[in-house]
Amino acid sequence: MSNRPIGYKYWTQLREHLGNTKGCVFDGELVYPRQLEIHLPGNHLIPCNFNCSHCQGRKLKQPLGDWEQIGLSLLRQLEDSIPYHIYGGAYTEPLLNGWLPHYIALTKQFGCSFGVHTNGSMLTERTDFLDVVEQTASSKKDYVSISLDAGDQKSHSFVKRKGGYFNIIVRGIRKLKELDNPNLSIRIVYLMNNLNSEPDVIKKAVDIARDIGVDSLRFSIPYDNYGVDFDHVRGYKQHMELRYKDEYYSVVEPYLSKGNEKPFIFWIPPECQDVDKLTYRQCIYSYYQITLGADGYVYRCSSTASPSFKACRLGKIPDSLDAFNAMIIANHNPNWKPQTCFSMGARCNRIAMEINEEWDSQKH
């Protein structure tokens, strides 16, 4: 998976964040992670306005807290301590939340970078979001990632199980591109399945990405839902990921980037996440990120940010910086057993797996 943008080279990112040294790992001191994931609680009525079958969080418990003002207070105290603020959700759509522009404005006030992961359905109507992005994006480190997962209205309706949104989303992506700010990076994500992988549909998606001029287009096969038994994950991998990987790759291969052209089109193979690789003895993903969950708790990581995985809670989101710092130190726990997560049906995402595998290989 070497032919991918720098924004997808996670071990390199972590090493750079730690100053190209691993000497500070597990020394008991406060080391802020590279990024803070913020899962805003939908609109307090629903977590997301789509019902995608491939959503990794769809089988998790999905409570929605009321903590946005506390979160903003915490961000003000953190200032620029954590350089990247990523707005997404284990089960929530960030653009449903009215506080999102306030958060992004505060992120940029302290010189941090933002990332937003969205289904794109509300881009055209959330002019307040577009305005703050236009006014504040300051480098290509600031990005909006849209889960398009389709090349036309029909395939989008099948995949998202919600009709009538495809053209709205494409218009929203165009609006992002048309903002008077060349610094914003626009990414499209395309998760492939048997409802959206016909060659003509893939070509339409590529043509849209090229016509708009987005920065990147990523193809991959969705992983199994979180919170299911690992035997179920293995069965899914055999019957979906490995069964179709050659077929799907052959469809996208003609479009994959050979150089640094824009959009950069790339493929992430299913081997990049495999539960049978979850054999490492320590987790250092805490140095990469920590998560404010949609339910109002701080979690060890974004993959576990649901009360389905209560053992991964570090406490309620505090408005005290000292309390949050204590959670960060607690998260840097050399004795935390990754098997604790795995026994609950939680598992590492692609980023955590890459980082922990690399750390494990260098230690042992």
Image: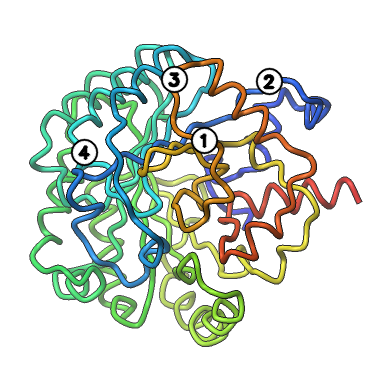
Disc 4 + disc 3, Cβ < 8 Å: no
Quadrant of the rendered structure where residue 30 is?
top right
Secondary element at image label 4: loop
Which residue is at 59% across, 21% downward?
325
Pick whichever of labels 4 and 2 is earlier in the sequence.
Answer: 2
Mark 2, residue position: 30
Mark 1 to mark 2 CA distance (whole Å) = 17 Å
Disc ID at residue 97: 4
Mark 4 to mark 2 CA distance (whole Å) = 31 Å
Kindly identify the amino acid type of the residue bearing the numbered disc 2: Leu
Secondary element at image label 3: loop
Q: Is residue 30 above or below residue 187?
A: above
Disc ID at residue 315: 1
Mark 3, residue position: 112
Q: Position of residue 26 (x, y in %)?
A: 79, 32
Circle nearer the viewer, 1 or 2 = 1
Which residue is at 21% across, 61% downward?
50
Disc 4 + disc 2, Cβ < 8 Å: no
Circle nearer the viewer, 3 or 2 = 2
